[in-house]
C-alpha cells in the first residue's frame, strides 16, 4: 500500500516552517508580505489500523492584505482514504472535557509518561475540501527527491531540503501538498481532517529536522489505553503527560469520521515544551506509539 504524509488518535500542536513543526506553512512565492504561524493544532484519532488526523492551522500576517492562499506539505504512511473539515469548536470542547476529567488524575492515579524502485513521482487523485485543495504525491526512493522538489517549486510551494525528505522517501510515504484560501490577515483556518491507514500511531516530526525549537502537544485518543510500553516509547522522544478516560464531546466524536470513536475513550495528553530540530535529526525513527493489542 502506498504511504502518505499526514498523522493517530491524537490532538497535536504543529509548528511552522522555521519555528514550528511537521507542516511547513508558507504564502505564495510572489507575495511580498510577512507571515508567521502562531500555532498549528491537530487532533489525531486511532482505531483498528485507521487514523484520523485533524489539523488546525493558525497564522498571522503583518501585512495589510493577507495572501490569497497558504500552502504546506505533510508526509503520511499511506495515501488518505478520505478528507473532511471539522467544526473548530471541537478543539475547545475537547480541552474543556479534559479539564473536567482532571480530578481523576488525583483520585485514581492516572498513568503518566516520563517523558530502489522506479525513480520519479506520481500524482495521485486531487481532492478539494472546503477551502482546501490537496494534491497527494507518491515519491519512491531518495532518487525521487529532486523531482518532488521540482514539482513543488513549479506549483507555488517552497522546496524541502533533501535531508528532511530522506526518511520518508526511503519508506515511500505519500506527500500531501495542501493549499488553503485565506480571508483575513490573522486567524484560524477551518480544521482539516485526513483519514489514512497505519498499524501504529504516527506523527511526522522528523520532517521538522533543523527547524528550530518549538512546543508540541499531542492529544492521543484511542478506544483502549495505550500499550504498556507507551511510556517508554514517549520518553524516547522527551514527551511527558497523563492519561485519562472520559466520554468524547459530540463535536470531537464527529471529527473522528474514519475511526468512528465515540463514547468513553482513553485520552493521553503528551507535551514537549521545547523540542529541538537538531535533536530530532538524531532520532532513529519518527514519532510513533504502539496501540493496545
Image (spheres, rainbow, N blue to C red):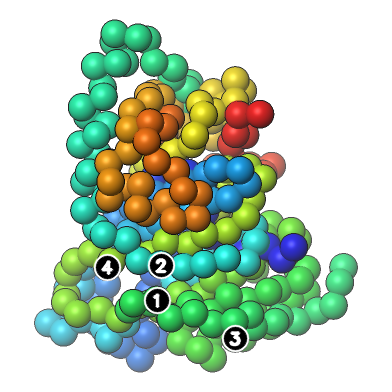
User: Which residue is drawn at the image coordinates 68% and 74% (left, top)?
Assistant: 138
**Based on the displayed image, in which of its 4 quarters is residue 5 positioned?**
bottom right
- Whether residue 24 appears in this view of the structure is no
278 vs 275, nearest the viewer: 275
Q: Which mark is residue 129?
A: 1
Residue contact at pointers 4 and 3, CB within 8 angstroms: no
Q: Going from the N terminus, do you reach mark 1 or mark 2 first?
A: 2
Distance from Cα at disc 1 to Cα at disc 3 = 22 Å
Q: Which residue, given by chain and number where applicable, does mark 4 sit on?
A: 189
User: As displayed, is residue 259 above or below residue 102?
Assistant: below
Mark 2 to mark 3: distance in Å? 25 Å
Residue 262 in percent (x, y) is at 40, 41
Judge whether 37 appears above or below 47 on screen: below
Q: Which residue is mark 2?
A: 84
Query: Which numbered disc covers residue 102?
Result: none
**Mark-to-mark CA distance, 1 and 2:** 6 Å
Whether residue 237 is visible here, answered yes or no, is: yes
Labels 4 and 1: the sequence-earlier one:
1
Front disc: 4 or 1: 1
SS assignment at label 2:
strand
- Which residue is under mark 3? 151
Amino acid at each position: 500500500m502506498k504511504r502518505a504524509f499526514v498523522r493517530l488518535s491524537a490532538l497535536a500542536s504543529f509548528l511552522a516552517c522555521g519555528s514550528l513543526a511537521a507542516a511547513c506553512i508558507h504564502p505564495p512565492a510572489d507575495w511580498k508580505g510577512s507571515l508567521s504561524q502562531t500555532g498549528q493544532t491537530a487532533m489525531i484519532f486511532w482505531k483498528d489500523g485507521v487514523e484520523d488526523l485533524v489539523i488546525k492551522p493558525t497564522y498571522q500576517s503583518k501585512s495589510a492584505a493577507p495572501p490569497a492562499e497558504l500552502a504546506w506539505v505533510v508526509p503520511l504512511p499511506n495515501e488518505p482514504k478520505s478528507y473532511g473539515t471539522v467544526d473548530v469548536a471541537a478543539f475547545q470542547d475537547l480541552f474543556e472535557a479534559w479539564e473536567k476529567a482532571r480530578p481523576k488524575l488525583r483520585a485514581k492515579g492516572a498513568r503518566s509518561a516520563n517523558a530502489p524502485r522506479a525513480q520519479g513521482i506520481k500524482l495521485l487523485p486531487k481532492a478539494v475540501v472546503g477551502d482546501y485543495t490537496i494534491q497527494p504525491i507518491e515519491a519512491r526512493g531518495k532518487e525521487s527527491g529532486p523531482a518532488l522538489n521540482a514539482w513543488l517549486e513549479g506549483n507555488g510551494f517552497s522546496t524541502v531540503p533533501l535531508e528532511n525528505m530522506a526518511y520518508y522517501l526511503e519508506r515511500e510515504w505519500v506527500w500531501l501538498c495542501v493549499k488553503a484560501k485565506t480571508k483575513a490577515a490573522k486567524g484560524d483556518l477551518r480544521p482539516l481532517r485526513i483519514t489514512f491507514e497505519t498499524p501504529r500511531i504516527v506523527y511526522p516530526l522528523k520532517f521538522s529536522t533543523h527547524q528550530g525549537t518549538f512546543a508540541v502537544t499531542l492529544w492521543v485518543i484511542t478506544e483502549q489505553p495505550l500499550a504498556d510500553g507507551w511510556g517508554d516509547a514517549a520518553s524516547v522522544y522527551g514527551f511527558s503527560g497523563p492519561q485519562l478516560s472520559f466520554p468524547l464531546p459530540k463535536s470531537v466524536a464527529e471529527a473522528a469520521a474514519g475511526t468512528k470513536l465515540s463514547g468513553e475513550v482513553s485520552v493521553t495528553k503528551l507535551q514537549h515544551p521545547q523540542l529541538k530540530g537538531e535533536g530530532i535529526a538524531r532520532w532513529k525513527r519518527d514519532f510513533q506509539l504502539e496501540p493496545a493489542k
